[in-house]
């Protein structure tokens, strides 16, 4: 075994996902993950704190990265445009994650504990993005609404992207989901809705 | 003490919220709640399973109620219109909850455990609404996107309604948040966004 393996982190992640899908997340130990990857407990600890971390480590930077991108977006952009520009910016950096992401999602979906953890992660993303929008001058309650909708667009686009490995990139999926929402909301006839 | 008190549930809820705000949710016992309300442990158990339930019992019916309303909405309405009609429908039933809701929100915000519980609740609402939209013929991945956006509109409207006790009703706040989102998204210049 080489003393330094640039692929160690990926190998551990791949081994963990395989095992989680084969035996169920709850039934897999870190020892089994390292054995399957042909690595040691020490290498595991270099990249992950525990087995749950294997699933969430990559999204750890998402709140800070997205918020930073919102803050840096062209001052001429509207709040929604700045938000979408930030999502497109981040999407570029995730280009190589589609295959693992689909497996990861299957594992998370099978466990209430992991779903809860995923929701906490997305709440952190929403809070960070809302903070960045406020820094651009968006009012508090509008910033939270936009951030929640931005996260919904991102999640939908990400799921479509990983579900349909047809070469359509994540940025295209983000534009598509946002345009779909704009068209749907734009066509709402508010007069046709029940009156208070 | 009367053997049957139609106000017992409200008195327990009010006593609990007062105590949570005074001493912190973690530090309050069910015995203290019933003592403050002048009621017995038995009356408490008639309405709530535990102290956390005091905060969430009212939203227990929300997933089923909203999903039912989406399914019953006029078949001529678009998916987004059906969703908004359902939100407006439910909003009518919540008219008397504004004062307690603001206190409740302050309690939940102060506790990570309760925030997590609240997120799980909203995830249940989203899943139920998405299911109802699929029953109306909306495609799966679009149904989830619309449901998430609908829940974001509802939460924003609810928070604005409870934050600003100025007589503006929840249905008006829902229309306002939806219109705001429609305007913001409608004005997005997709050509001004970064290209992949």
Image (spheres, coloured by chain):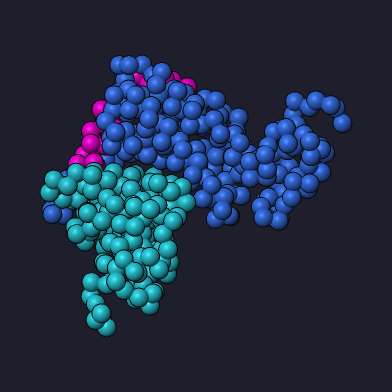
Chain colours: A cyan, B blue
Image height check: is B93 above or below A90?
above
Tell me the quadrant of the picture where the N terminus of chain A can be found.
bottom left
In reply to whether residue A110 is colored magenta, the answer given is no
Image height check: is A142 above or below A39?
above
Q: x and y percent of residue B75 in the render?
A: 32, 16
Work out whether residue B187 or residue B133 is closer to the camera in this orientation and state it: B133
Q: x and y percent of residue B153 in the render?
A: 41, 37
Q: x and y percent of residue B41 in the render?
A: 79, 39
Q: Residue at x 44, y 22 (%)?
A: B69
- Magenta segment's dominant SS is helix
Give the side of residue B121 with respect to residue B5, left or right.
Answer: left
Image height check: is A46 above or below B15?
below
Residue farthest along the bottom direction in this orientation = A3
Q: Which stretch did the figure color magenta?
A: A172-196
Q: x and y percent of residue B70 in the render?
A: 40, 24
Inspect this view and state whether residue A122 appears: no
Give the side of residue B151 with respect to residue A70, left or right.
Answer: right
């Amino acid at each position: 075994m080489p003393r330094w393996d640039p692929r160690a982190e990926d190998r551990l992640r791949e081994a963990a996902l395989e095992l989680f899908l084969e035996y169920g997340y709850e039934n897999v130990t870190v020892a089994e993950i390292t054995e399957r990857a042909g690595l040691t407990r020490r290498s595991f600890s270099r990249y992950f704190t525990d087995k749950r971390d294997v699933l969430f480590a990559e999204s750890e930077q998402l709140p800070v990265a997205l918020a930073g991108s919102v803050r840096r977006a062209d001052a001429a952009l509207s709040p929604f445009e700045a938000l979408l520009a930030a999502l497109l910016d981040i999407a570029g950096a995730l280009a190589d994650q589609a295959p693992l992401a689909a497996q990861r999602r299957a594992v998370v979906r099978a466990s209430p504990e992991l779903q809860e953890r995923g929701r906490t992660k997305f709440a952190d993303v929403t809070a960070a993005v809302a903070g960045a929008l406020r820094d651009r001058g968006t009012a508090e309650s509008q910033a939270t609404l936009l951030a929640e909708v931005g996260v919904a667009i991102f999640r939908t686009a990400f799921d479509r992207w990983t579900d349909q490995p047809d070469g359509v990139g994540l940025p295209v999926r983000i534009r598509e989901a946002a345009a779909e929402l704009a068209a749907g909301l734009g066509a709402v006839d508010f007069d046709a809705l029940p009156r208070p």
